[in-house]
Image (tube, rainbow, N blue to C red):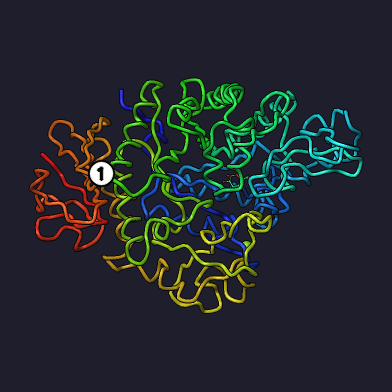
């Protein structure tokens, strides 16, 4: 029986709402802005969109600090705007996923305000992780955990107690051992499911359960903190990451989703140690997907990428799960800058994208990836990210600069805002218009044209390609991904050249005449695939 669920082989486009499109001219992207650009996304050829948090929020972490999970912040619009977006998206055959933030709320959530107003030991405080401090007068934090944004993970309140926040002090962590918390999140999930959303992206999905007694980090673990955010997030052995009890939460969420029409899903943002740990979130009675961050973090080497793919399938197949592939999101340096300097980074970003689109499973694209946007070097005085404000590196603003839609600025921030609008919340750098959708429209060599073609071909082949994949790596240079076609249809071979020299097609049994798509016009030249490129070949 064919699998008719929408998500196993989908391409989902992540919309960082603040930076996508601003309809009301306040310089901040909003829901009506998203709605106005949905036809562009339908034409791009994606199947779904994921909206980053647009709920009521004081914006301490740009919406990942939620003060009301069932309402829209006026900055982004109204619930009616959300409903209009959803209707419009469904009319264009686009699924809609919303971001759920269950590890922590905002410090302006009614529960947290009630907790502050109540006494230590009260029922109100028991929804969060309040503890007495250590040392004389309890003046030291209850343990040595560090916030992911830098500094201690504890903040002291006037009566002397401390509360835990794995992120900003404006993001107090819930106590998930308190049944009230689980009940409240079931209500939140149902609120959005009843409205018609197709799925959820679960923020910090591996963090909700903390080890009993909130034990100190060891000296070794502590020394490793404060490094790159991603390195620590990827560190499995921490008393606040990937605790076994987390899975009970997802068993409950699984049955909530199953109460609907059988086609709603959730994807975990779980930065866990390896593919086996990831696959535990994907057991048949848990979540449908988890971001495969091992693909994103792999070094540029055919051998390393091959190992990630093999490891992913080895871990996900036994639990019957579908893998996902992701190269970029709103937390990491844009692939076009991260993967190499000068022209190398953009070339590799296209090649990495083409390779992941050739793999069975679901792909996640981040807004602007289809334009080949580079990371922006945001000036220190313009930076907004709490990670920067808390002293942990330059922060993530550089991948969050408002999108350019038009070549000319025309007082509209390159079409991001209407004429006469306030400045965009993050300044766009000089020359931003050259990356715009308008500038790339009609240019066959553009990244936009490339992504559109790749997504169209992927859709056309989806039903005829086997979900079995054969891989091999030619030395450290080329990764070859091969999928057979069903009877009568051609199969697909994707070759990704990570090496420094061209790979001859004959050595792979391929022919330049069979190229379906390549990352650039000169990627296949002299019967060879050039370095930092990829191509798809049809095989009979
Ligand atoms: C996730 C989000 C990130 C946010 C953090 C805290 O990692 O992707 O943007 O800062 O959670 O909610
Ligand atoms: Mg706006």
Residue at disc 1, CB closer than 8 Å to ligand 1: no
483 lies left or right of 215: left
Residue 54, visible in the rendered structure: yes
Q: Residues within 10 Å of mark 1 (few under 14, many from 20)?
A: few
Residue at 31% across, 26% down:
2
186 lies left or right of 36: right
* Residue that lies at the very extreme toward the front in this rendered image: 219
Residue at 43% across, 45% down:
297
Q: Which residue is mark 1?
A: 460
Quadrant of image for the C terminus: top left
* Secondary structure type for disc 1: helix
Quadrant of image for the N terminus: top left
Task: Answer with the quarter of the image where residue 106 lies.
Answer: top right
Task: Answer with the quarter of the image where residue 223 lies.
Answer: top right
Residue at 89% across, 32% down:
120
Q: How many marks?
A: 1
Q: Position of residue 457 (x, y in %)?
A: 26, 48
Q: Position of residue 279 (x, y in %)?
A: 45, 27
On screen, 107 above or below 276?
below
On screen, 68 above or below 23?
above
Q: Nearer the viewer, residue 100 or 401?
A: 401
Q: Position of residue 246 (x, y in %)?
A: 60, 26
């Amino acid at each position: 029986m064919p699998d008719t669920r929408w998500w196993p082989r989908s391409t989902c486009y992540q919309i960082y709402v603040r930076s996508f499109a601003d309809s009301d001219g306040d310089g901040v992207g909003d829901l009506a802005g998203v709605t106005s650009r949905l036809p562009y996304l339908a034409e791009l050829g994606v199947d779904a969109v994921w909206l980053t948090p647009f709920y009521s929020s004081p914006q301490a972490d740009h919406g990942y600090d939620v003060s009301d999970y069932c309402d829209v912040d006026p900055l982004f619009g109204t619930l009616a705007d959300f409903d209009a977006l959803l209707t419009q998206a469904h009319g264009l055959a686009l699924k809609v996923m919303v971001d759920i933030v269950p590890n922590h709320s905002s410090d302006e959530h009614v529960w947290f305000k009630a907790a502050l107003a109540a006494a230590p030991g009260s029922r109100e405080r028991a929804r969060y992780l309040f503890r007495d401090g250590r040392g004389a007068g309890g003046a030291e934090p209850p343990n040595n955990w560090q916030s992911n944004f830098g500094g201690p993970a504890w903040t002291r309140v006037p009566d002397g107690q401390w509360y835990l926040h794995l992120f900003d002090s404006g993001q107090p962590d819930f106590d998930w051992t308190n049944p009230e918390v689980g009940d409240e999140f079931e209500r939140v999930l149902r609120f959005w499911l009843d409205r018609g959303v197709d799925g959820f992206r679960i923020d910090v999905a591996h963090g909700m359960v903390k080890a009993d007694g909130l034990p100190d980090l060891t000296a070794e673990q502590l020394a490793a903190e404060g490094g790159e955010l991603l390195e620590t997030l990827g560190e499995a052995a921490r008393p606040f990451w990937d605790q076994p009890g987390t899975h009970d939460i997802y068993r409950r969420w699984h049955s909530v989703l199953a109460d609907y029409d059988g086609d709603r899903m959730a994807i975990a943002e779980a930065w866990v140690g390896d593919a086996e740990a990831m696959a535990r979130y994907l057991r048949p009675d848990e979540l449908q997907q988890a971001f495969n961050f091992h693909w994103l973090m792999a070094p540029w080497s055919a051998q390393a990428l091959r190992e990630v793919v093999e490891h992913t399938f080895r871990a996900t197949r036994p639990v019957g799960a579908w893998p996902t592939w992701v190269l970029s999101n709103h937390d990491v340096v844009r692939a076009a800058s991260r993967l190499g300097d000068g022209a190398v980074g953009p070339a590799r970003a296209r090649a990495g994208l083409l390779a992941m689109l050739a793999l069975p499973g679901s792909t996640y694209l981040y807004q602007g990836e289809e334009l080949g946007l580079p990371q922006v070097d945001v000036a220190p005085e313009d930076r907004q990210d709490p990670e920067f404000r808390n002293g942990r590196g330059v922060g993530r603003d550089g991948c969050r600069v408002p999108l350019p839609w038009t070549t000319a600025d025309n007082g509209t921030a390159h079409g991001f805002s209407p004429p006469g609008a306030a400045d965009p919340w993050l300044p766009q750098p000089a020359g931003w218009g050259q990356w715009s959708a308008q500038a790339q429209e009609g240019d066959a060599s553009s990244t936009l044209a490339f992504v559109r073609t790749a997504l169209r071909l992927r859709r056309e082949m989806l039903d005829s390609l086997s979900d079995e994949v054969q891989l091999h790596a030619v030395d450290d240079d080329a990764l070859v991904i091969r999928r057979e076609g069903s009877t009568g249809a051609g199969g697909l071979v994707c070759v990704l050249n990570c090496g420094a020299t061209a790979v001859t097609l004959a050595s792979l049994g391929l022919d330049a005449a069979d190229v379906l798509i390549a990352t650039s016009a000169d990627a296949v030249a002299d019967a060879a695939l050039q370095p930092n490129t990829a191509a798809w070949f049809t095989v009979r």
